[in-house]
Image (cartoon, rainbow, N blue to C red):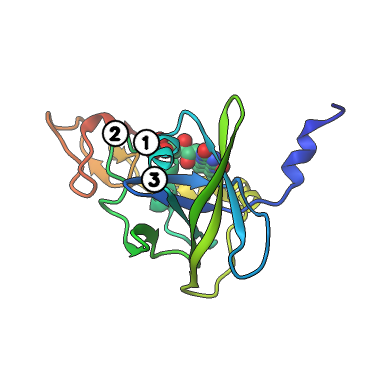
Amino acid sequence: MKNIKITRKITQGMYVLTTKEGGCIVDAVSQVSSGEEPFIAVAVMKSNYTNELLKKNNKFAISILSQDVNAEIIRTFGFNTGRKINKFRNIETTKVKEIDVIKDSIGYIVCEIVDTIENDTHTLFIGKAIEADIFEEKDPMSYGYYQEHKEELLKVTTKKGKTAWICSVCGYIYYGEELPENFECPICKVGREYFKKQ
Ligand SMILES: Cc1cc2nc3c(=O)[nH]c(=O)nc-3n(C[C@H](O)[C@H](O)[C@H](O)COP(=O)(O)O)c2cc1C
């Protein structure tokens, strides 16, 4: 191949993929047919817990994120695994066809899985849309926009001169030299091992 980096020029978006009991951030989503019940394909890494859950379930939802989405959603679903935390504890969702969709999104598509294709690293889940709606007309966040703005998007501002411990899941800040023993995040309830000193 002369230059595989050309694939980075394929426009992708930013989505929360959810299924029963879990989900993760994905950019690898495509609409692969049109009509009343279009087919939607999503590629999910085999190492992701969401992949395991999708294989036990027959439905998934794609919630489409806007440029002004709360960064906590990206942190929670994109940088943590459902093997260790409950990602829905602190994020507002609403159930559609038994699947949680993200309220702070432009809208959603719920699909029934009709086929899968495997390669070494990913499973491509192909779904047929069975429900879809728009919550709010806003500019969708593209993957390119996320890459360009991720530092400011995910930045947590702390008070100058103070030692801060930041929860890597929800961004809660604890001020103090050391975290108390058995400390638990008051917001998302994860343990002290999820806190990073700044
Ligand atoms: C911007 C961004 C894009 C991502 N795109 C994908 C993707 O297309 N497919 C995928 O499987 N994981 C993708 N991930 C990684 C998963 O969201 C991440 O590994 C997540 O923690 C997996 O959680 P889980 O173990 O609960 O499934 C992306 C993460 C980020 C931050």
Give the position of the C terminus as an image quadrant: top left
Q: Nearer the viewer, residue 37 or 198?
A: 37
Q: Is mark 1 within 8 Å of ligand 1?
A: yes
Q: Residue at x 65, y 68 (%)?
A: 35
Choose top left, top right, bottom left or bottom right for residue 163.
Answer: top left
Q: Residue at x 46, y 50 (%)?
A: 17
Percent across and percent down for residue 82 are 33, 38
With respect to residue 27, does 48 lie above or below?
Answer: above
Mark 2, other Cα within 10 Å: few <14 / some 14–19 / many ≥20: few
With respect to residue 111, does 7 lie above or below?
Answer: above
Mark 1, other Cα within 10 Å: few <14 / some 14–19 / many ≥20: some
Q: Measure how far apart labels 2 and 1 are at the Cα level.
A: 6 Å
Percent across and percent down for residue 125 are 55, 44
Mark 1: amino acid: Thr
Is residue 79 something that shows in the picture?
A: no
Q: Residue at x 55, y 57 (%)?
A: 128
Closest to the camera, between mark 3 and mark 2, is 3
Disc 2 marks which residue?
Answer: 84
Tell me whether circle 2 and circle 1 mark residues in contact (CB < 8 Å). yes
Disc 1 marks which residue?
Answer: 81
Choose top left, top right, bottom left or bottom right for residue 53.
Answer: top left
Disc 3 marks which residue?
Answer: 57
Give the position of the N terminus as an image quadrant: top right
Q: Nearer the viewer, residue 4 or 170?
A: 4
Mark 2: amino acid: Lys
